[in-house]
Amino acid sequence: MADASHVSEKRLQVHWWAFLILLGPLAVFYFGDMLPTALGNSQLVFGEVALKSQVDALELAARMRYVAATLLYWAVAIGVLGLFLFDLLTRHGLYSRLMAAGAGVVAFAIFVLLSINRPPWVASYRTYELMGADLFDAVLAERRVDACTGSFPFRDGCDLEGAWFVLETLQGAMDLPNVASVIALILGMVLALSRFEGAPALTTPEGLRDEAGALAEAQLTVRRYLYCTGAMLTIGMAQLLAYIKWPHGLIEDSTAADAYGELVMSVALFRGIYFSVIILSFYLPTSLVLLKRIRDFNHALGKSDDAVTEPITEDFDLSHPGSAQALRSVLAIVSPILVGAVGSAWGMPLFN
């Protein structure tokens, strides 16, 4: 293994081409955001649906579950941003910091532009429009929100909005931390491809030691950001389910309730797969580049006459599906699908 003091004295530096990996998630975001409205129906109408008695209490329960899930997502998003900034400022040199900052700004701008500039045949939509805007209006419009009574300094006169005020305010406040934290997760994994500044060639003992230290740190970084991404997008699925299941428990008519439940399950399945594809879009190219570097390192080490370090094990290689690390990686990738399926089909206390 590389000497710890030798490794800690050096800063990491990433090559500019590593940031091309950002193109994969951006493409997934673009097409994944268009598909629901391009192939779905954003004008879905349920018509007159009878609601259960004690509708105010049931709606308030659903509202507070949504607020709880949103607060949890905010907390995780802030934690992810903190982790990324800590790694960037403590382990990487000035060049990597500037490249990461520039790539982050460009990626954020592209996210915004892709959201605004849609093809003419793709309409802008809100998630509740795919679920039946009239049903959401029947559930939310006439509910009381204390912040709208005039005694709170948030928005005087919003009493006519009812619980729409909660939904619109919290969903709008999620946009910035949502995009920023996802970009931070992608950049954090991309930065795992860094090498130590001024690292010698692999033909020298010093170069082998540097590469061994960089690869060991890279694998830890990839695992850390993979697990963080899986956890964050899983909580994102929980927040989405709390959102789209908001009216479900208030529907009296069993036929309408069953139809809405099927819709919830379908939307949750799509979003779960969408989130998992986002993870794969940057985890897979990063792991393949690291796999190539590890094999090059082990090959160079085998040709060296100096036993300066040990061979690096490919502990993130999904070609060994029986390993514990591979199973954990697969679970992190598919966790949004699993949560979407379980939360929509059988329900969890946070969603129902």
Image (tube, rainbow, N blue to C red):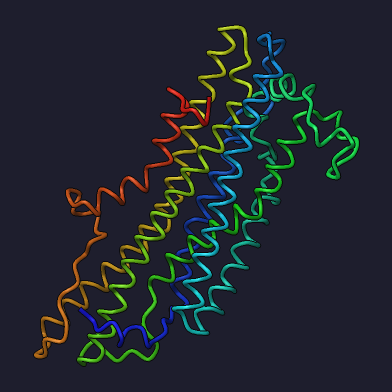
Left/right of residue 334 with respect to residue 31 in the rendered view: left
Q: Residue at x 77, y 35 (%)?
A: 165
**Farthest left residue in view:** 305
Q: Residue at x 39, y 77 (%)?
A: 194
- Quarter the N terminus occupies: bottom left
Left/right of residue 123 with respect to residue 194 in the rendered view: right
Residue 303: % across, % down:
11, 85
Which of 297 and 343 lies nearest the eye of the viewer? Answer: 343
Q: Residue at x 48, y 25 (%)?
A: 265
Residue 21: % across, % down:
45, 64
Which of 318 and 50 lies nearest the eye of the viewer? Answer: 50
Instruction: Say which quarter of the image contains residue 42.
Output: top right
Residue 272: % across, % down:
46, 38
Residue 200 versus residue 290 in the image, above or below: below
Residue 2 versus residue 63 in the image, above or below: below
The number of callouts visible is 0
Residue 73: % across, % down:
56, 46
Instruction: Say which quarter of the image contains residue 109.
Output: bottom right
Which of 281 and 279 lies nearest the eye of the viewer? Answer: 279
Which of 137 and 250 lies nearest the eye of the viewer? Answer: 250
Q: Residue at x 18, y 53 (%)?
A: 320
